[in-house]
Structure formats: C-alpha cells, structure tokens
Amino acid sequence: MKDMYILGIESSCDETSVSIVKNGTQEIATVISSQIDIHKSYGGVVPEIASRHHVKNITIVLEECLEKANMKMEEIDAIAITYGPGLIGSLLIGLEAAKTLSFIYNKPLIPVHHIAGHIYANSLVKELQFPLIAVVVSGGHTELIEMKEHYHFEKLGGTLDDAIGECYDKVARVIGLEYPGGPKLDKLAAEGKDTYKLPVPLKDDSYNFSFSGLKSAVINLAHNEEQRNNPLRKEDLATSFQKVAIESIISKVRKAIQDKNIKNIIVAGGVAANQVLRREMEKLATECQVELSIPPMKYCTDNGTMIAAAGYYAYLEGRVADLTLNSKSQDILK
Ligand code: KG4
Ligand code: ZN
C-alpha cells in the first residue's frame, strides 16, 4: 500500500489542533492552539467562549500546519475529524472545517471518536500489541477498554460519576490551584506527605470507578479545617488525595490484567501525564510482566496528531463518513 498522509483535526474542548501523520505512526507536523490562558480566569472551560476561539483559530492553525509540513492540501490523502464526544459548539467548528476540506479537495472524511484518538496516541510511540487494555484517564473519561485487534473496542468498565481529571480539577480548585488544576496538584503532591485519611473509592469486584465520594470527602475536609481555624496542609492533602485516586485506578487495572491474561497495557488521556500514575503503572507492569506504553507528555493532552493516527486505522476498517456527518456531545466508543 502506498504511504498515506492523514490530516487530523481536533477541537472537542479548548484546544484547536491540526496535524499531519504518515501511515498512522509518523508525525509530520502538528500545530496546537490552546485556550487555557483564556479560560483560567473563569476556573474552567466556558463552552461559548471556546467555540468562538475555535472559529478564530481553525484556519490559522490549518495553514500553519501545512506550512510546517511543507505540504499542500492536494498531497493529503484523507481528513480525520473528532466528531465527539465533547463540547458541541467546539466540535462543530472542527467538523465544519473538515467537511469543507473534504468537499473542496475531494478527500475521504474519517470520523474519529475522541477516546479512540487518545488510545491511538500510543501508536505514535510503539506498535500496539493485542490483546491489550487501554486505561483511558482524561478530563471527561475514566474507562478500561479491551482491544483484541485494531479499532475494535470493548468497554470493561468506567466511572459511575466523575471522571478522574474532573475530580483532580475540582480538588485542585478547593485547595486554591488555578485551572487546569490537575498538573499543578500533581506537582504540589510531590512536596507533601500522605497524612490525611480519605475514603478509598469503589473497592469492589467490578472494573468500574467512582470519584465523586472522594471529591466530596476532600471538599468537606477542607471546609471543616477552615471552620476549626486549622491551617490546611495543602501539599499533604494533595499527596493523600493523589495516593487514593491513583491506587483506585491501579487496583482495577491489576484485576483486568489478571482476569483477561493481558500482555500489553496502554495509558491514554490527559491524566496519563500524571507522575504518580506513570510510576505506579510502571511498577504494575513489572509486577505482572506486561508490556507498558505511555505516550510522552505532548501526546497526552488533546491534539490533532492522535486523531490523525486513529484516523488511519479507522480508514483501514472502512470507517468513512459522508457530508451528513454530525457532531455528538456524547457517544459510546465502538
Ligand atoms: O485528555 P485531556 O486533555 O482532555 C479531555 O479529553 O478531557 O485531559 C485533560 C485533563 C484535565 O482534567 C487535567 O487537569 C488533567 O487531564 N491532567 C492531569 C495532569 N495533566 C493533565 N491530571 C493529573 N495530573 C497531571 N499531571
Ligand atoms: Zn481528551
């Protein structure tokens, strides 16, 4: 088969990103325009503002990416687009751009589920080995997905309430860290000690997770300390929270490896950047003798590279859409 250059577009939340990837594994060029600084003052992403910025950015990001790759649209073989899940207004901007390019240049349009993108960020690092379990940990998702072959996904379990990243961001806010608090909380936790007692989430036999109880426990603890005029040891609370949150992920992954006789574990999503999660996953992989793949930081948070990589394997499975493709704020990975 001849080389295939896929242009990937991602705009599901607050990053506008376009990337060109060769054969699903080789990054040619990527441009990411992040809106973090804009949303910071609101303590979280404001959907309406996010969409407006995607409108402003998309053409610039696209042109910059083609320039960086030294390529013309005519040389692109197909266009991969995050159709969902995500913020509907944000998704629509990327989708309309992708559809327009597909129509004008007569290129196949490949719909990519955002989580498939996070999973395939790993194929930019090393070849996926099946069967594998993907540990998807992001601002909107916490899921264990089993894959027996390329682009076939089976959900083993997921969060029953908050996603882990969402929980990190809320806890971070309570202890006074700026949005997005996850990475800042991770850093602060490195300076503290595990001294606060917090409830261990959902210690059961399923592959599911629950983080809302843990989040509420941290919020209540912070309020109680404030009412008693006890100074909050922020770094200790960060360490204690992080220990319980990550252990709850690790214990379910350990169970999945043992039950499913898995040989390869991959970690995906923004929280894959977490230092303790990375370290504990490495320990677990050694303990269970499985191959581990965690993307470098630049592929962990939202980017068009992962969408172009996933798009390649989706295309090989014949997943091509026509111009009636619509965005979906919610959609199950299948
Ligand atoms: O995958 P992503 O970029 O966006 C979604 O698809 O949700 O993930 C963003 C999430 C945010 O909640 C952010 O706080 C979290 O990932 N995050 C982290 C770290 N880096 C990013 N959480 C904990 N520790 C980190 N180092
Ligand atoms: Zn994401």
Image (cartoon, rainbow, N blue to C red):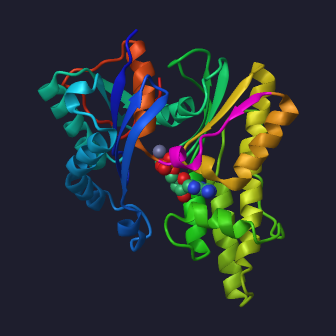
In the rendered view of the protein, which quadrant contains the N terminus?
top left
Q: Residue furthest left?
A: 104
Query: Looking at the picture, how far across and down is residue 250, in whole percent?
Result: 76, 42
Would residue 250 appear left or right of 23 to someone viewing this image? Answer: right
Residue beneath the point at 23% across and 45% down: 63
* Residue 154: quadrant of the picture: top right
Residue closer to the observer: 34 or 259: 34
Q: Is residue 132 above or below residue 125?
A: above
Q: Position of residue 326 (x, y in %)?
A: 25, 32
- Expressed as whole percent of the image width and height from the top left, the position of residue 177 reads 56, 73
Seen from the viewer's position, the closer of residues 168 and 220 is 168
Residue under the point 68% across and 70% down: 188
Does the magenta-highlighted stretch encompass residue 197? no
Q: Which residue sits at x=18%, y=32%?
A: 101
Q: Is residue 2 left or right of residue 226?
A: left
Q: Is residue 217 visible?
A: yes
Instruction: Give the residue at the far top of this rendering.
Output: 1
- Residue sitting nearer the eye, 251 or 229: 251
Asked if residue 294 is among those painted magenta in the image, a careful observer would answer yes
Taking 26 as reference, is 182 above or below it? Answer: below
Q: Position of residue 80 (x, y in %)?
A: 33, 29
State the extent of the magenta-drawn residues as a range.
Answer: 290-301
Could you tell me which residue is drawn at 44 percent across and 69 percent down?
Answer: 43
Do we see residue 113 in this rendering? no
Name the residue at the bottom extreme: 229
Q: Residue furthest front?
A: 70
Q: Is residue 85 above or below residue 316?
A: below
Q: Is residue 285 left or right of residue 35?
A: right
The tally of labels here is 0
> Going by the image, does 313 lie left or right of 240?
left
